């Protein structure tokens, strides 16, 4: 018999600031690098997004109606510090107090992400942002401020969202000057700055609020071998190492995996570490591990003569349009998994991979875990009678909750699950064509319409899941 989910399990949903808030330059907020990057995209910009900044009370009431036990959201760094440091913006500080208070009044646990890609543009202009080591100290000061200001009401803080995705998509998640975009060693150096920012933030926050719980959140994509050949199995192991463990070990062990460092040294890509970094990383070990899970990957062997490729994003949601898969010569090449169906955006749908990932990571680190994001991006349609029938999303989420329960039965200490996303938001690479929400936001990329909130069928399904503590799904 299944153990089921504990009585205090946190059923939640998630968003991020720049994707939902809008008000990109209102009430003293400074520009972020995502505000600037979005203006270069064909999908519209962050100036309005889903207008959560002005409608948060309406949205929280919908969360209460849904029955949410937790809401994971991010705080916009430039809304708090328009210049990245210095004097805080009173209106920005007040906004997040009001949001957190509103959540608490409705019995919803706030889970706060400190950084979800929106670095203050002022720091990019000053010293290049994450390309410069100075950003680590600025982030740590910002993190300590959040802990002092909100830590009496927030128990769980997440430092950096998806550091491994930031590395892999570094020109989409950071502003990188064109002349530097092919500097692979600089890319790894930037990643180390993120690692040290996490470690420094953990140290500073614990001095201010030792009672709060801290963790990072990688996007975990377990890698399977294409065949059972030893070479493909080694390629899958390499993919797991360099796509997952290399980014998670510093959070959970306070060190990089030795094999990964050896690969980077042999390839001439080893980044610079300063004296004392290893000690700081040990101070930054997380209290819990949050995981974003959407898909698995498949890997085959490749030799050193193959051409390096970064994985090309499927921007338009056309089945079969993904032609380029990540290739790291001599280590692994990703490829299509012939055993799995895919979404409209060619992402493999693999609930079993969630069991694989959670059990593997829990055995490796032994810390409490949460699912910080899990969801399906699709082309939802608002019908003439004002409904959204997203049975495909319900099926996807049901399959993943079944997998979640199997992982719990196998001994994984899991305390929260957050679906991505609470309401439709501006997908970083796909705009509003790719919708994830339980609530439909009535707008398109270029047509704001009325931004009305429409509860999808999946909203009512998840409402029942929460009410039954996961027994009915």
Image (tube, rainbow, N blue to C red):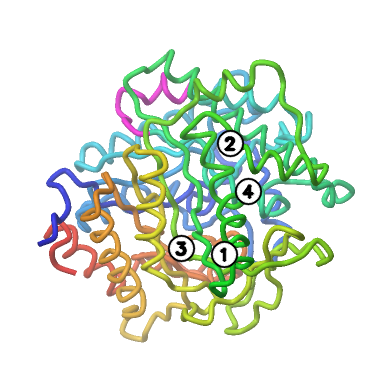
N-term mark: 4 or 1: 4
Helix, strand or loop at mark 4: helix
Q: Which residue is mark 1?
A: 233
Q: Nearer the viewer, residue 242 or 444?
A: 242
N-term mark: 4 or 2: 2
N-term mark: 3 or 1: 1
Residue at (52% x, 66% y) in the render: 224
* 320 in relation to 210, above or below: below
- Evaluate if marks 2 and 1 touch, with contact meaning CB atoms under 8 Å apart: no
Residue at the top extreme? 207
Residue at (35% x, 37% y) in the render: 367
* Residue 294, label in figure: 3
Q: Quadrant of the N terminus?
A: bottom left
Q: Which residue is mark 4?
A: 166
Measure how far apart labels 4 and 2 are at the Cα level.
Answer: 23 Å
Number of marks in the image? 4
Residue at the right extreme? 179
N-term mark: 2 or 1: 2
Helix, strand or loop at mark 3: loop
* Residue 29, label in figure: 2
* 423 in relation to 320, above or below: above
Closest to the camera, between mark 3 and mark 1, is 1
Which stretch is magenta? 145-156
Residue 182 picture location, percent across and down:
84, 52
Q: Quadrant of the C terminus?
A: bottom left
């Amino acid at each position: 018999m299944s153990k089921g989910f504990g009585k205090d399990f946190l059923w939640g949903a998630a968003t991020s600031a720049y994707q939902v808030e809008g008000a990109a330059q209102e009430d003293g907020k400074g520009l972020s690098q995502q505000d600037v990057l979005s203006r270069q995209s064909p999908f519209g910009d962050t100036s309005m997004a889903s207008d959560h900044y002005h409608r948060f009370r309406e949205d929280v009431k919908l969360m209460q109606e849904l029955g949410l036990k937790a809401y994971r959201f991010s705080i916009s760094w430039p809304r708090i510090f328009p210049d990245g440091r210095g004097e805080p913006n009173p209106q920005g500080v007040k906004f997040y107090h009001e949001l957190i208070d509103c959540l608490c009044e409705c019995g919803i646990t706030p889970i706060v992400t400190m950084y979800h890609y929106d670095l203050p543009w002022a720091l990019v202009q000053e010293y290049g942002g994450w390309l410069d080591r100075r950003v680590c100290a600025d982030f740590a000061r910002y993190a300590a401020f959040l802990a002092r200001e909100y830590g009496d009401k927030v128990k769980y803080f997440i430092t950096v969202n998806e550091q491994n995705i930031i590395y892999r998509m570094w020109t989409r998640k950071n502003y990188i000057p064109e002349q530097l975009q092919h500097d692979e060693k600089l890319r790894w150096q930037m990643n180390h700055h993120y690692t040290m920012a996490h470690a420094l933030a953990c140290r500073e926050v614990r001095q201010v609020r030792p009672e709060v719980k801290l963790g990072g959140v990688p996007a975990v994509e377990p890698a399977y071998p294409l065949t059972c050949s030893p070479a493909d199995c080694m390629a899958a192991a390499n993919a797991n190492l360099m796509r997952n463990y290399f980014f998670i070990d510093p959070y959970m062990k306070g060190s990089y995996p030795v094999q990964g460092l050896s690969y980077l040294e042999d390839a001439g890509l080893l980044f610079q570490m300063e004296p004392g970094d290893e000690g700081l990383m040990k101070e930054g070990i997380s209290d819990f591990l949050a995981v974003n899970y959407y898909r698995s990957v498949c890997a085959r062997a490749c030799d050193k003569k193959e051409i390096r490729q970064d994985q090309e994003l499927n921007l338009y949601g056309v089945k079969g349009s993904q032609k380029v898969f990540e290739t790291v010569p001599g280590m692994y090449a990703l490829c299509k998994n012939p055993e799995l169906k895919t979404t409209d955006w060619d992402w493999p749908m693999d609930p079993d991979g969630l069991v694989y990932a959670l059990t593997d990571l829990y055995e490796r680190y032994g810390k409490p875990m949460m699912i910080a994001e899990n969801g399906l991006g699709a082309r939802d349609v608002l019908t003439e009678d004002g409904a959204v029938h997203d049975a495909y999303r319900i099926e996807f989420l049901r399959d993943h909750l079944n997998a979640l329960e199997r992982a719990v039965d196998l001994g994984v200490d899991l305390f929260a699950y957050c679906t991505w996303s609470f309401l439709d938001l501006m997908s970083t690479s796909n705009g509003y064509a790719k919708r994830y929400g339980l609530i439909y936001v009535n707008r398109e990329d270029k047509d704001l319409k009325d931004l009305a909130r429409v509860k999808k069928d999946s909203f009512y399904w998840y409402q029942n899941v929460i009410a039954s503590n996961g027994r009915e799904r």
